[in-house]
Amino acid sequence: MQTTLATEKDVFSRYEKFVIAIIAIIQFTVVLDFMVLSPLSAILLEEMKISTSQFGLVVSAYAFSAGISGILAAGFADKFDRKKLMMFFYIGFVFGTFLCAIAPTYQFLMMARIVTGIFGGVISSISFAIISDIFKVEHRGRVMGYVQMAFAASQILGLPIGLLLANKFGWHSPFWMIAIFSVFVGIVIVFYLKPVNEHLKTKSTINPFVHLWNTVSNSGYLRGFLATIFLATGGYMLMPLGAAFSTRNLHIHQDLLPVLYGVTGIFSIVSGPLIGKMSDRHGRFKIFLFGTIISGIMVAIYTNLGPTALWLVILINIILFIGINSRIIASSALMTSLPVQKDRGAFMSINSSVQQFSGGIAAGLAGLIVLKPASETAPLLHYDYLGLVVLVSMALAAVMIYRLDKQVKRQQLEIKKSA
């Protein structure tokens, strides 16, 4: 990441590069904590003797608790220094991950995921609010491109290492890895991240709950929340049972899953910054539409596969994740431009909650739609149905992002005229 950021010498200051790096690392830990459950699905289904619907509930528990937490925090999100807010929720996230690391039963794991979600689910919204406060609109696509590298890094470093640890030391070990690493990240935040409190200079006497209502009821923001619903539905449905689908349906051996995730992640981490630059240069919607088309084609192919050679599965995943990266980076950059400064914290918190609620429902539905036969080697049933739901959600998201892109351009034009 350091080498890549060096190429942006004329765009970002040294401290801005640090902010990008630390936010990307924070996102890495939070994303890894969520994503590591997907490759562990093949292990947990057998070790805990649970059904696909029960596993879907574990994923949903995190999402729903994160959604509720985000709504409750939204009214207060613009009342505090964003650094202090980040530290409060990050400490809670580390504690929740520790609980996952010691979980002895399915019920305890469910409780631990709820605690982790309460704190971890708000961190992304605080990160995006910090990005909006520090970086110019015309550079946010690049920033999101670098931050999106966290997802790829979680595949290159986190998921393969997590899987190797799980295969050798048990499924608890990846959570120990995340918790210990996150402690060191927290120390760096305390000593090196400067206060982010520019928004506090505009004194507001509005009651936090009134502020929450004003943000929720804003018609312009509502379009953003609706777009997030469709984005999250498509994003959360395929992930939770992805590892189980790979082992049972595609006949990829459990020991080869780190190779699948690692190689895919390498291509994702390279494509992230490039997609971010293209988003700033050619327009967010164009890049989003490009990503929707190629990822839609790959979803249609992937969800209908039977036993497949590893190299072909890797190729499909690489193209799929380039498409997913394009959609996430472009839409995230667009979302940061939607709220005005005084509403950024509240908007990002509510938007994160909408994402978590939608993702939780999607993950729960995925667990109900996909069936696990009694046989431990039989393929999962109805995974292709998920593909159809995802394709519909992607098409609806494209329509909403198109409308948001037009709205943001009008807002920016009005700002320039009034300046």
Image: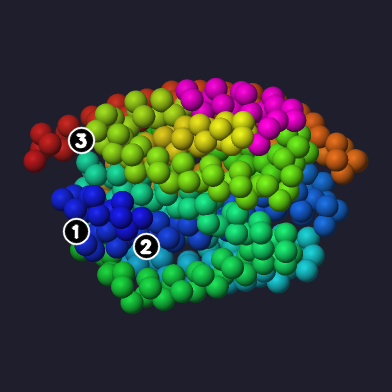
Q: Is residue 142 left or right of residue 210?
A: left
Residue 256 rendering spot, x and y as whole percentages: 68, 47
Q: Nearer the viewer, residue 209 or 51?
A: 51
Q: Amino acid at mark 1?
A: Ser
> At numbered mark 2, what does the secondary structure look like: helix, strand or loop?
helix
At a point 26% along the width and 65% down the height, the residue shown is: 197
Quadrant of image for the C terminus: top left
Query: In front of the other: label 1 or label 3?
Result: 1
Q: Is residue 364 in view?
A: no
Distance Cα–Cα, label 2 vs label 3 = 29 Å
Q: Nearer the viewer, residue 355 or 385?
A: 385
Residue 193 rendering spot, x and y as whole percentages: 31, 69
Segment colored magenta: 293-310
Figure quadrant of residue 405: top left
Dot 1: few (<14), some (14–19), or many (≥20) neighbours within 10 Å?
few
In the picture of the structure, the residue carrying the numbered disc 2 is 22
Q: Amino acid at mark 3?
A: Gln
Q: Nearer the N terminus, badge 1 or badge 3?
A: 1
In the picture of the structure, the residue carrying the numbered disc 3 is 412
Distance Cα–Cα, label 1 vs label 2 = 14 Å
Distance Cα–Cα, label 1 vs label 3 = 24 Å
> At numbered mark 1, what does the secondary structure look like: helix, strand or loop?
loop
Quadrant of image for the N terminus: bottom left
In the picture of the structure, the residue carrying the numbered disc 1 is 13
Residue 298 belongs to the span the image colors magenta:
yes
> At numbered mark 3, what does the secondary structure look like: helix, strand or loop?
helix
Q: Nearer the N terminus, badge 1 or badge 2?
A: 1
- Check the image and report above or below for 223 versus 71: above
State if disc 3 and disc 1 touch (CB < 8 Å): no
